Image (cartoon, grey):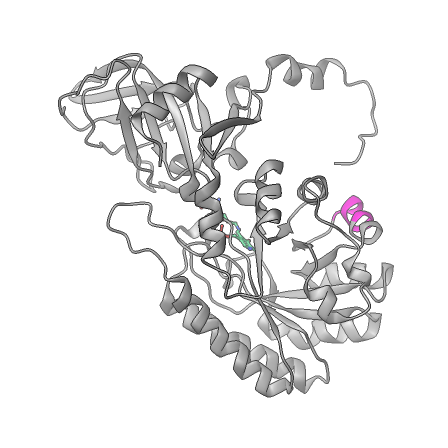
Amino acid sequence: MLTDAQTRALARQFGTPLWVMDAPTIRERLASLQAFDTVRYAQKANPNVHLLRLLREGGAKVDAVSRGEALRALAAGYQGGSARAATLHEAAQADIVYTADLLDRESLDFVVTEGLVVNCGSIDMLRQLGERAPGHAVWLRLNPGFGHGHSKKTNTGGEHSKHGIWHGDLTEALGVIQATGLRLVGLHLHIGSGVDYGHLGRVCGAMVDLVRQVKAAGLDLAALSAGGGLSIPYREGEPRIDPAHYFGLWDAARREAQTLLGHGLHLEIEPGRYLVAEAGALIAEVRAVKRQGQVPFVLVDAGFNELMRPAMYGAHHGLRLVTADGRVAADTAPSAVAGPLCESGDVFTQGAGGDIERRALPAAAVGDWLVIENTGAYGSSMSSNYNTRPLIAEVLLDGGAARLIRRRQRVEELLALEIESTETRQPAR
Ligand code: LLP
């Protein structure tokens, strides 16, 4: 995505480490999903308010999984209030859907006050909302009993997943909806991140069975959500998903469900990664090069507090060296690439079990830059302040311009949380 010249210019202008996002790539990915009635962005992938605005302008709706994410959506111009919309059809097109498996007390107050349509992943959540706000519009997030993900940690279906209402409990959930007067908008299935077509076929089949149960219980619905999970090619040669094929499978399920219910259904998809992953890169500077016995190490100024995916899942990200002086660097022995944190797991080249891997890279020198590719999703959004490292800056490229969309945090801001805290009762999250 970034040329060598752009990398040098951005690193010099904004400093490193630096997140860079490319607006045209995001717009292009969004456009490729236009066959769906709604594309709902799972903002957990990257919730920067400027990206939310960009996606809103492109026609995307948004998902929020916390009060904070919902406040971001409101700040980006999305509207609440749809939970009280006159028709289910309108509620199905809500700007914001709040998806969770539980509602803490503050969030329960918040979704009711703001009128946010809620996608419920537990029956307790449904009961609490129903008692508090009869008439509120809800989706049911169901666990079909199986799931799939690029890692065990991103599988969101099956017995070992905490997510969703178990498929066998659908009748009970529908009973709570009827008893409390909640209004059912639709059914939602998200079985994990990194889904393949084989699993997708099974999910679509499961959806039709679930719709059949809703009908048998005497209820109706207006929409189906295919969840997210669309994969992207992290490694060279990995296949890219075909949006038309993806839509075709879901559209067939939608048609079957329509036949069962005797009316049209709204079909939505809820991707995070697919929209933003390939639009993002992390630029880090090489600060040390050393050898541990036989293993060459390239040490850069970004760590797993910035990009957690390799340490958390053994995730693979392309690495590209950009020399500071424009020299053409010779190939060297495959190297491990690691960061500055005081923890041995702070390595960008590692497998899922934590074994250090080595990657072919040109010979790096201090002052060169390393571009860590495809980091637009679950990069900056999963960053932490570990080792008291402030969050880094984020830049958006659009129409030849580079705009700072998040300034770098200051250590003083972190310290203020501790030094200025005198209240015992904490304000809302
Ligand atoms: N919808 C629901 C209900 C979800 O739980 C998720 C992701 C998505 C949509 C978006 O999934 P996507 O299209 O981005 O795969 N941190 C992990 C991914 C965790 C995803 C959690 N839920 C990673 O870095 O791969």
Q: Horizontal and vertical percent for residue 81?
A: 80, 55
The quadrant of the rendering that contains the C terminus is: top right
For the point 86% across and 59% down, the residue is 132
Q: Horizontal and vertical percent for residue 39?
A: 56, 58
Q: Is residue 235 left or right of residue 269?
A: left
Residue 234 versus residue 117 in the image, above or below: above
Q: Is residue 108 inside the magenta stretch?
A: yes
Q: Is residue 92 inside the magenta stretch?
A: no
Residue 37 versus residue 281 in the image, above or below: below
Q: Could one spot residue 48 in this view of the protein?
A: no
Q: Horizontal and vertical percent for residue 305?
A: 48, 27
Residue 287 versus residue 96 in the image, above or below: above
Q: Who is closer to the viewer here, 346 or 410?
A: 410
For the point 53% across and 69% down, the residue is 144
Q: Is residue 159 left or right of residue 100?
A: left
Q: Who is closer to the viewer here, 309 or 114?
A: 114
Q: Is residue 237 left or right of residue 399?
A: left
Question: Number of labelled discs?
Answer: 0
The quadrant of the rendering that contains the N terminus is: top left
Q: From the image, give the main secondary structure of the stretch colored magenta.
A: helix
Q: Quadrant of residue 294?
A: top left
Residue 56 versus residue 255 in the image, above or below: above
For the point 43% across and 44% down, the residue is 25
Q: Horizontal and vertical percent for residue 207?
A: 54, 74
Q: Is residue 96 left or right of residue 192?
A: right
Q: Could one spot residue 152 in this view of the protein?
A: yes
Q: Which residues are magenta?
A: 104-110
Q: Who is closer to the viewer here, 395 or 110?
A: 395
Give the residue furthest to the front.
399
